[in-house]
Amino acid sequence: DVKVTQSSRYLVKRTGEKVFLECVQDMDHENMFWYRQDPGLGLRLIYFSYDVKMKEKGDIPEGYSVSREKKERFSLILESASTNQTSMYLCASSFGRLTSGANVLTFGAGSRLTVL
Amino acid sequence: GDSVTQMEGPVTLSEEAFLTINCTYTATGYPSLFWYVQYPGEGLQLLLKATKADDKGSNKGFEATYRKETTSFHLEKGSVQVSDSAVYFCALVPRDSSYKLIFGSGTRLLVRP
């Protein structure tokens, strides 16, 4: 089975700190994604990457950046954390285009970030 | 833009009751449709999917039929179990954006013994 591992399950940071959320997948998937999950809002796409060093903005990229130096690793960066970035962050990966129906997202367990 | 609307939760049922979670969508063309489930403390996992009109996705006793006439993809199960307690997300992949999965807000299901 594909495994997507998020390095931190729980983090507490202070306003203004730089925060790194790390995600690693072990099945050679081309595509990787960062979502944010908030009650009543579902999941919203922050950034995704379809290849090494490639990235695309999702629906809510403001305040975030990403890095994909290696195929298996996709990092989400909060340059200066703010309280409104307190949330659950979910990483996911997939092989190929999602419209094929054969390719689906595989998610990590999530990283719950609290910004004080 | 494309969007997914789910019924608000929580939905509370007794074990062996019938479950329906409503999902409707707005999209250009015919998107692929999915149900994902999130068990407590875990990430999301795919429950079932349908890629064209009239397709029925099924898994673990859950079913959903892609209805283009009503732009719906309602999730059903004939007899729920306590272990089905989770948050259920309806989602679509637009035809013009192969990499984006658009989610509904999620519906929490609580099944009581």
Image (cartoon, coloured by chain):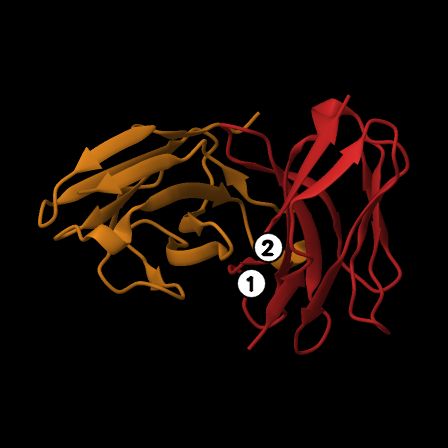
Determine whether the residue tagged by mark 1 lies in a helix, strand or loop. loop
Amino acid tagged 1: Ser
Q: Image check: B55 left or right of B47?
A: right
Q: Is B58 placed left or right of B32 in the picture?
A: right
Image disc number at residue A98: 2
Query: Contact, CB < 8 Å: mark 2 with mark 1?
Result: yes
- Distance, label 2 to label 1, CA atoms, is 5 Å
Write down the chain letter for disc 2. Answer: A
Front in this rendered view, residue B38 or A25: B38
Q: Colour of chain B?
A: red
In this picture, is B29 found above or below A105?
below
The residue shown at (67%, 55%) is A100
* Residue under pointer 1: B98
Judge from the rendering whether residue A57 lies leftward or rightward of residue A65; answer left or right.
right
Query: Is B91 displayed left or right of A113 in the figure?
Result: right
The image position of residue A19, as x and y in percent, is 17, 42
Amino acid carrying label 2: it is Leu
